[in-house]
Image (cartoon, grey):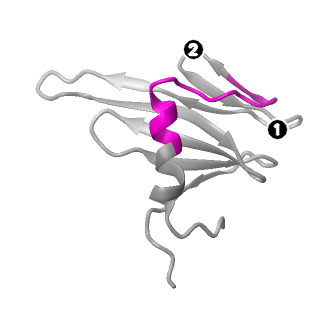
Amino acid sequence: MLGIADVDAEFMPLQQAQAAKGDAALPKGVQRSGRTLVFERPGQAPLRLTDFVYKGRDDGGDSQRFIYLKTLEKFHLLSVAFSHDRPCFLLVERQTLALFFVDYAPLPS
């Protein structure tokens, strides 16, 4: 979809730079309301992505935090930071608010 051969090289530096700061500047139609990142388009239901923290009794628990990284031509780029796993990346299509998971698998050469 994006034609990026190495997702780590392309997106991980953005995630590492932004993780401690929180969201990058949010464009029109995107806002943070507490723990929820909200995407809105006229005439469409909003897309809401909510952070969470779970504190387990017998384990370290878990957390998930959505961080807005940048606006691409057709997509909003987000990272999803977890308390114990490597982050993953999501794309939100700007026109439809469709959500896409970014696969780490390398593109065939």
The answer to whether 8 is drawn above or below residue 29 in the figure is: below
- Asked if residue 80 lies in the magenta stretch, the reply is no
Residue 109, position as x, y percentages in the image: 51, 85
Residue 96 vs residue 79, the one in the foreground: 79
Q: Residue furthest top?
A: 34
Q: Is residue 74 left or right of residue 36?
A: right
Q: Residue at x 14, y 29 (%)?
A: 59
Residue type highlighted by circle 1: Gln
Question: For the residue labelled by badge 1, is the local secondary structure a helix, a strand or a loop?
Answer: loop
Q: Is residue 95 left or right of residue 64?
A: right
Label 1 environment density (alpha carbons within 10 Å; few <14, some 14–19, many ≥20) = few
Q: Residue at x 40, y 44 (%)?
A: 87
**What residue sits right under mark 1 in the picture?**
44
Which part of the image, by quadrant, shows the N terminus? bottom right
Label 2 environment density (alpha carbons within 10 Å; few <14, some 14–19, many ≥20) = few
The answer to whether 101 is drawn above or below residue 70 in the figure is: below
Q: Residue furthest left?
A: 58
Residue type highlighted by circle 2: Gly
The answer to whether 31 is drawn above or below residue 15 in the figure is: above
Q: Residue at x 53, y 25 (%)?
A: 22
Q: Which picture quadrant has residue 76? A: top right
**What residue sits right under mark 2 in the picture?**
34
The residues colored magenta run: 14-31
Residue 16, position as x, y percentages in the image: 45, 38
Q: Residue at x 20, y 24 (%)?
A: 56
- Asked if residue 20 lies in the magenta stretch, the reply is yes
Residue 31, position as x, y percentages in the image: 70, 23
Q: Residue furthest right?
A: 42
Mark in front: 2 vs 1: 2
Residue 25, position as x, y percentages in the image: 69, 27
Question: For the residue labelled by badge 2, is the local secondary structure a helix, a strand or a loop?
Answer: loop
